[in-house]
Image: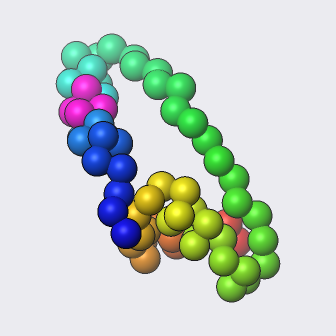
Amino acid sequence: MSGNIGMEQLIPIVNKLQDAFTQLGVHMQLDLPQIAVVGGQSAGKSSVLENFVGRPLSNCQVQCLSVG
């Protein structure tokens, strides 16, 4: 599965911009899209997100998304 090349190139640029603004003491707010996937354990939530973003999520990313 190939990811979204444009998004893959954009994310590091946005991260660098956020770091630069933080170092300058300037608050930079980005209105990024938000999505919620709800379901029981092993219901395929991670698979839905992986298909949505077009690339596999690492184990850390999946665990960080989990809510007790």
Q: Is residue 29 left or right of residue 37?
A: left
Residue 15 seen by the camera: no
Q: Is residue 8 left or right of residue 68?
A: left
Question: How is the model colour-coded?
Answer: rainbow
Residue 42 at x, y = what percent? Answer: 68, 85
Of the pair 3 and 15, the residue shown nearer to us: 3
**Residue drawn at (58%, 71%) of the image:** 46
Where the N terminus falls, by quadrant? bottom left
Number of callouts? 0
Residue 10 at x, y = what percent? Answer: 29, 36
**Residue drawn at (57%, 36%) of the image:** 33
Extent of the magenta region = 13-17
Q: Is residue 39 above or below residue 10?
A: below
Residue 48 seen by the camera: yes
Of the pair 58 and 49, the residue shown nearer to us: 49
Extreme residue in the front direction:
1
Q: In which quarter of the image is residue 66?
A: bottom right
**Residue drawn at (40%, 19%) of the image:** 28
Q: In this view, does 38 lie above or below 31?
A: below
Residue 64 at x, y = what percent? Answer: 51, 65
Q: Main secondary structure of the magenta part?
A: helix
Residue 53 shown in magenta: no
Of the pair 54 and 25, the residue shown nearer to us: 54
Where the C terminus falls, by quadrant? bottom right
Q: In this view, does 48 lie above or below 16?
A: below
Residue 32 at x, y = what percent? Answer: 52, 32
**Residue drawn at (33%, 62%) of the image:** 2
